[in-house]
Amino acid sequence: MENTMQPMDQREMMTLQHYLKEYGQQAEIFMSQLELLENGRLEAHAAIEALEAMLTAEDNTLLLQIGGGASVRAKVLEPEKVLLAIGAEVVVERPNKDAVEFLKERIIEMEASQKKVAETLDRLRSQMNEINKRLESGYQQTMAEQDAD
Amino acid sequence: MFGGLREKLQAARNRLSGSIQAAEEKQEAPVPQGAPARETPAVPEEQRSSGTAPSFVDKVKILIKDRELVVSEKDVAEALDELEMTLLESDVALPATDAIITHVRKGLVGKRRKIGESVDHLVVSALKTALLDVLGSGFDLTGYIRAHPKPVKILFTGVNGTGKTTTVAKIGSFLKKQGFTVVIGAGDTYRAGAIEQISVHAERIGIKVIQHQEGADPSAVLFDTVQYANSHKIDVVLADTAGRFHNKANLMSQLEKIKRVMKPDLVVYVDEAVAGNDAVTRAFEFDKTVGADAVVLTKADMDSRGGAAISIAHTIGKPLMFLGVGQAYDDIMPFEPAKLVDELLDGES
């Protein structure tokens, strides 16, 4: 394929490097956002599992993780009632079933957000690829010039 | 933008309309046989005392009044409770939620639906008024710049990683397109690469940037920027600063120094819409500590809930100026409350 790219000067190469760095920083922010969303999604799934298991647990007894790999057997006083943070730092009491529904809706919301962030990240990465290609061609051009000298 | 909130508000709107319609049908239901006759509208005292029969006009008046629907507290109580939950679930701050519910209740209870007016219209009108009241009037930056002595100095503050530097560039590009001359002060001398970042942005949009080396005193950079603007008759100074949390005393005192030195006309707080209620809380703390005249919310295109955008103006009492809605320089829109409310509430019921 014929190379249609114009020769690059040092100044343009530096600008492209700046762009690449900046896009890289932006991509990092979006990646950490994606990670936060994924953690939230997994947490909600775990909560749903626990809430559903609570209703069928014998004698209302559950294994409660207290950190550091330690667990204790705990008896849930009211497995039918759940205190749920619904947003805006407000906690409300909901029936177990409603809390599960709420968490399922949250998961759908988080998945939609994940999709949007991932799309933005893909766009950024493709821009970074373009810049990388352009830089690569610039480096080769510089090397060729140096060899000719 | 705010797709989740729009869906939930549409559902709340339908629920409210449904409740009122159900109440209306109950009022209009035919009287079953054997049941006590429906009370006839009261004849005014003066007519009874005069002993004359009601005229045709009076009869029509009574008929119209009889056909009108008066919304009672009971008719909408349940739907309002659901609306409250909907708003809280969308991360709308509690004070803003309370204000919206109070407004909607006030707009509906005791209200007579006019003949020919749809119940949905009544509900949408009450919701729109309530949301507009909470959203405030926005902030017309171009109008402000035109009305004030030049250069208008705008200082951007906020926590780390919310997109302050990019916002400065976007607003610079927006103002340039509106015909203003702009200079940017690279006041974030703390974060590695921040000066480079703002310089690249400024070069791309064709705006002059004043910069010192990394680690320099930001007050000095911004003082020089204002001096440059004065000597070159520039309309607007956009001052970027390093991100900081309101509880870091040394960084906050640095911001105080910047304010003393450059004497900004506007202090703009920048945060991300996706932070939801956290953004509202942080804006409140920033306003308490260093003051803020307006707010910019970034990444609004990725925010499905819209809680921060709805509550921030009401909670901190400062207007929302711009919403960042994407990666390109043009992806910033002046915040227009009426437009947002229309987008949230208009559509098929």
Image (cartoon, rainbow, N blue to C red):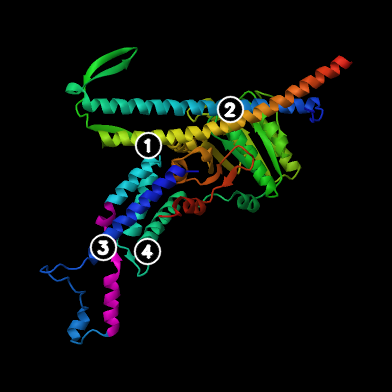
The residue that disc 2 covers is A27
Quadrant for the C terminus of chain A, please.
top right
Q: Position of residue B95 (x, y in %)?
A: 37, 44
- Mark 4, chain letter? B
Q: Quadrant of residue B128 in the image? A: bottom left
Q: Quadrant of residue B228 in the image? A: top right
- Mark 2, chain letter? A
**Depth check, front residue: B240 or A129:** A129
The residue that disc 1 covers is A105
Q: Say yes or no: labels 3 and 4 on the same chain.
A: yes
Query: Which of the labelled discs sits on residue B25, or is there none?
Result: 3
Tag 4 secondary structure: loop
Looking at the rendered structure, the kind of residue marked 3 is: Glu
The residue that disc 4 covers is B118
Q: Position of residue B240 (x, y in %)?
A: 62, 34
Residue B323 visible in image: yes
Mark found first going from the N terminus, 3 or 4: 3
Q: Position of residue B223 (x, y in %)?
A: 67, 35
Asked if the magenta segment contains residue A49, the reply would be no
Provide the residue span drawn in magenta.
B56-77
Looking at the rendered structure, the kind of residue marked 2 is: Ala
Mark found first going from the N terminus, 2 or 1: 2
- Name the magenta segment's main secondary structure: helix
Query: Which of the labelled discs sits on residue A22, or is there none?
Result: none
Tag 2 secondary structure: helix
Relative to B108, B244 lies left or right:
right
Relative to A80, B227 lies left or right:
right
